C-alpha cells in the first residue's frame, strides 16, 4: 500500500541540502515535491497545501544534530504531521453494550458484508467474544447467502429470515435473539445505498434509531480516492457515525482517503481491509501507518501478529527441544503453519524496517511455503522425527513424492540443518534467549 506515495516522499527528502539547520532555502524544493506527492495520491489540494505549511512551520529553524542530515530531520517532521493528519492516536471500537450493537453501513460494493464477517472473526478470535451476525441486506439477492457462507467459515452464527421485507423489524428480532442466546456482540450487515437515495438513507437512519448501536461504522472503498472522502462526509451529515472502515487498501489505491478522511469528517479510521480472506483486517493505528508510508516498516504490528500465534509456554517447550538438539521436521512444519496464520508473507516482510522496497518487485505468493510443505509431507513419520536417517535413497523417494527433484530436497535438508544449528546457538549458555524474546514480545503487546 502507498508504494507510489512512499517513493515520491523518499525522493523529496533526498533533495534537501545543507547542514546545521533547516531553513526556508534548503527545504523549498522538498516541500513542493511533498505537496505534489500528496496531490498525486488524491489528497485534496487545500489539505495538501495546509499540510506542507505545517511541516514548514514545524521544521523551520530546527537544529540538525551532527548524527543526522537535514533530510532525516525532515522525515521526522513529516512523520509527526502525517500521524496528526490521520488522527494522532488509535481509537478502540466501543463494545460496552449487552450485547454491544455494531451497525455496518456504506455504499453499494464497498465491501460491507465481507467486512462484517472479518470483524466478527476479529472479535471472536482476538477479544474472545461470542458474536452474532445479522443479515439485514434485504435487497441484494446474494447478500444473505454470502453472509451465511462467511459465517460458516469463521464459526459464527448468522441470524436471517426467509422472504425478508422489513430490515428494521429483522434487526429488532435479531437483537432479541442475541440477548436470548447470550451473544456479547451483534454485527448488523445492512444494504448498500447511495448518499442521494432518500428512501435508503431513511432506512439506515431508522435502523440506527431502533437499535441504538454502541458503534456505527461507515465502510468505504479506499480505491475510490477523494470520492470516498466526499461520500464519508455526506453519510456523516445524515448518520453521525462513530468510525470509518477503509476496505481494499491493499489494492491499486493512491491512499488519499486514508490520509484525509479524519480531517474532513472528524471521525477516526478504526479498521482497514487488506485482502479478501476473513483474517485480512487490521486495526488502524495512525502512527504505524505513517511508519509504513515513510518506509519505516511496522515492527509493532508484526510483533502483535506473532504474539497472537505464539505463547510463552510453547516457546519454552520449543527451546528445550532445540537445546537438546531434538528440533525436527514436525517442529519445523509447525513453525511454518504459525507463520502462515500471521498473514501474507510479503506483507509481513514489508513490516520489517527497510524491507519494503527490497521486496517490492519480488514475487512472493501466499503459497510461498507450498514446495517446502510438499517435501516434508512426503517424508515418513520416522523421517520427520529423525532427520539423521535421510540417506540418498530416502531423499530420492521424497523428491518423487513431492513432485520435485532431489536437489530441492537436499537444499531443504541442508537449510534445515543450518537453521537447527543457529537456533541451538541461541539457546546455549542458559540464557534462554528465545523465551526472553517471546516474553518481551508479550510485554510490547501489553
Image (spheres, helix red, strand yellow):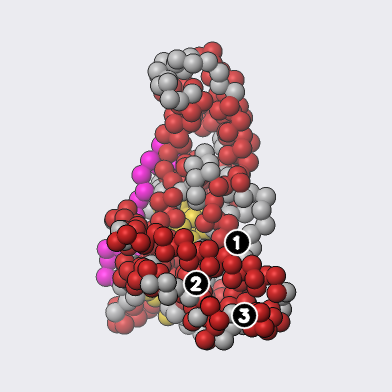
Q: Quadrant of residue 322?
A: bottom left
- Classify the position of the C terminus by image quarter: bottom left
Q: Magenta stretch: dominant SS?
A: loop
Q: CA distance from mark 2 to mark 1?
A: 41 Å
Q: Counting other residues with Cα less than 10 Å from the Cα at mark 2, is it few (<14), some (14-19), or many (20 or more)?
A: some
Residue 100 part of the magenta-drawn span? yes
Earlier in the chain: of badge 3 and badge 1, it is 1
Q: Could you tell me which secondary element the residue under label 3 belongs to?
A: loop
Up/down of 324 relative to 304, above or below: below
Of discs 2 and 1, which sits in the foreground?
2
Earlier in the chain: of badge 2 and badge 1, it is 1
Q: Residue at x 44, y 29 (%)?
A: 77
Q: Which residue is mark 1?
A: 109
Q: Residue at x 38, y 72 (%)?
A: 324
Q: Quadrant of residue 93?
A: bottom left
Residue 243 part of the magenta-drawn span? no
Q: Which mark is residue 332?
A: 2
Of discs 3 and 1, which sits in the foreground?
3
Question: In the image shown, does 126 or 423 lie closer to the viewer?
Answer: 423
Amino acid at each position: 500500500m502507498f508504494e507510489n506515495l512512499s517513493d515520491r516522499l523518499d525522493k523529496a527528502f533526498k533533495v534537501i541540502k545543507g547542514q546545521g539547520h533547516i531553513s526556508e532555502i534548503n527545504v523549498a524544493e522538498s516541500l513542493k515535491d511533498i505537496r505534489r506527492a500528496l496531490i498525486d495520491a488524491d489528497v485534496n489540494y487545500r489539505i495538501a497545501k495546509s499540510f506542507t505549511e505545517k511541516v514548514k512551520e514545524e521544521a523551520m529553524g530546527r537544529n540538525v544534530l551532527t548524527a543526522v542530515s537535514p533530510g532525516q530531520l525532515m522525515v521526522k517532521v513529516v512523520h509527526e504531521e502525517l500521524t496528526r493528519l490521520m488522527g494522532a492516536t488509535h481509537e478502540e471500537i466501543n463494545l460496552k453494550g449487552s450485547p454491544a450493537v455494531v451497525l455496518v453501513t456504506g455504499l453499494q460494493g464497498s465491501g460491507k458484508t465481507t467486512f462484517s464477517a472479518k470483524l466478527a472473526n476479529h472479535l471472536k478470535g482476538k477479544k474472545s467474544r461470542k458474536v452474532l451476525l445479522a443479515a439485514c441486506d434485504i435487497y441484494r439477492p446474494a447478500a444473505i447467502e454470502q453472509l451465511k457462507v462467511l459465517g460458516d467459515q469463521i464459526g459464527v452464527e448468522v441470524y436471517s429470515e426467509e422472504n425478508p421485507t422489513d430490515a428494521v423489524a429483522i434487526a429488532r428480532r435479531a437483537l432479541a435473539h442475541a440477548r436470548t442466546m447470550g451473544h456479547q456482540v451483534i454485527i448488523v450487515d445492512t444494504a448498500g445505498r447511495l448518499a442521494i437515495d432518500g428512501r435508503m438513507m431513511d432506512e439506515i437512519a431508522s435502523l440506527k434509531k431502533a437499535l441504538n448501536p454502541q458503534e456505527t461504522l461507515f465502510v468505504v472503498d479506499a480505491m475510490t480516492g477523494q470520492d470516498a472522502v466526499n461520500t464519508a462526509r455526506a453519510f456523516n451529515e445524515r448518520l453521525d457515525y462513530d468510525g470509518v472502515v477503509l476496505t481494499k487498501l491493499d489494492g491499486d489505491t493512491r491512499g488519499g482517503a486514508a490520509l484525509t478522511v479524519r480531517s474532513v469528517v472528524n471521525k477516526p479510521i478504526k479498521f482497514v481491509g487488506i485482502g479478501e480472506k476473513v483474517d485480512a483486517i487490521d486495526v488502524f493505528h495512525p502512527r504505524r501507518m505513517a511508519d509504513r508510508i515513510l518506509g519505516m516498516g511496522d515492527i509493532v504490528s508484526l510483533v502483535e501478529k506473532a504474539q497472537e500465534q505464539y505463547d510463552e509456554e510453547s516457546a519454552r517447550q520449543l527451546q528445550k527441544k532445540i537445546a537438546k538438539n531434538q528440533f525436527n521436521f514436525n517442529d519445523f512444519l509447525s513453525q511454518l503453519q504459525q507463520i502462515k496464520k500471521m498473514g501474507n508473507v510479503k506483507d509481513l516482510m514489508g513490516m520489517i524496517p527497510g524491507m519494503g522496497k527490497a521486496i517490492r518487485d519480488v514475487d512472493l505468493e501466499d503459497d510461498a511455503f507450498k514446495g517446502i510443505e510438499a517435501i516434508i509431507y512426503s517424508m515418513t513419520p520416522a523421517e520427520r522425527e529423525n532427520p539423521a536417517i535421510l540417506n540418498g535413497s530416502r531423499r530420492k523417494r521424497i523428491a518423487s513424492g513431492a513432485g520435485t527433484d532431489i536437489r530441492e530436497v537436499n537444499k531443504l535438508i541442508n537449510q534445515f540443518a543450518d537453521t537447527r544449528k543457529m537456533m541451538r546457538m541461541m539457546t546455549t549458555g542458559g540464557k534462554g534467549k528465545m523465551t526472553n524474546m517471546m516474553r518481551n514480545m508479550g510485554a510490547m503487546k501489553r
